[in-house]
Image (cartoon, helix red, strand yellow):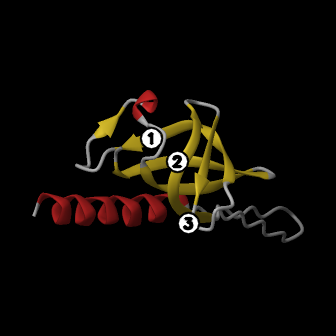
């Protein structure tokens, strides 16, 4: 029951956060010009093979081919119970779900949801 509530809570946070992350702005000058900027987001899941708090995380998504991700400056770490954790509490072999955002020309992790700790 607790796991179901944690999953529902995490999914709700994910949807709310994703909606808050998309922004559009327009600028009009003497010559009509419209500029639109949209923040794109993606997700990735797997088992942590390497982790350096505040720097990088490597996951095995189940293919046996690890994928490396850069940690963003304002990463949030959420535990299986939905509570905020310290970034140092992510451990090797933990099952996680990463939320990725585009920052300029690179994609970075801005949220780590720990689904199952090892």
Q: Nearer the viewer, residue 33 or 62?
A: 62
Against 99, residue 35 (above or below) is below
- Left or right of residue 84: residue 14: right
Q: Nearer the viewer, residue 55 or 73?
A: 55
Q: Report x, y in % for residue 82.
A: 26, 49
Q: Which mark is residue 62?
A: 3
Q: CA distance from mark 3 to mark 2?
A: 11 Å
Q: Name the image quarter holding the N terminus.
A: bottom left
Q: Nearer the viewer, residue 92 or 86?
A: 92
Q: CA distance from mark 1 to mark 3?
A: 24 Å
Question: Mark 2 = which residue?
Answer: 48
Against 39, residue 51 (above or below) is above
Q: Residue at x 77, y 50 (%)?
A: 104
Question: Mark 1 = which residue?
Answer: 76
- Left or right of residue 92: residue 13: left
Q: Who comes first in sequence, dot 1 or dot 2?
A: 2
Q: Residue at x 78, y 65 (%)?
A: 35
Q: Name the image quarter holding the C terminus.
A: top left
Question: Quadrant location of residue 7?
Answer: bottom left
Against 64, residue 93 (above or below) is above
- Left or right of residue 91: residue 48: right
**Residue farthest to the front?**
64
Q: Report x, y in % for residue 92.
A: 49, 40
Q: Residue at x 58, y 30 (%)?
A: 54
Secondary structure under the numbered disc 3 in the rendered image: loop
Q: Who comes first in sequence, dot 3 or dot 2?
A: 2
Q: Who comes first in sequence, dot 1 or dot 3?
A: 3
Neighbor class of circle 1 (other Cα within 10 Å; few <14, some 14-19, many 20+) is: some
Closer to the observer: label 1 or label 3?
3
């Amino acid at each position: 029951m607790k796991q179901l509530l944690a999953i529902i809570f995490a999914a709700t946070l994910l949807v709310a956060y994703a909606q808050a992350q998309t922004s559009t702005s327009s600028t009009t000058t003497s010559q009509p010009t419209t500029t639109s900027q949209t923040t794109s987001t993606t997700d990735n899941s797997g088992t942590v093979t390497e982790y350096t708090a505040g720097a990088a995380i490597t996951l095995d998504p189940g293919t046996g081919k690890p994928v490396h991700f850069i940690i963003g400056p304002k990463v949030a770490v959420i535990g299986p119970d939905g509570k905020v954790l310290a970034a140092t509490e992510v451990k090797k072999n933990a099952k996680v779900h990463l939320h990725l955002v585009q920052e300029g020309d690179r994609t970075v992790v801005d949220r780590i949801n720990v689904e199952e700790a090892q």
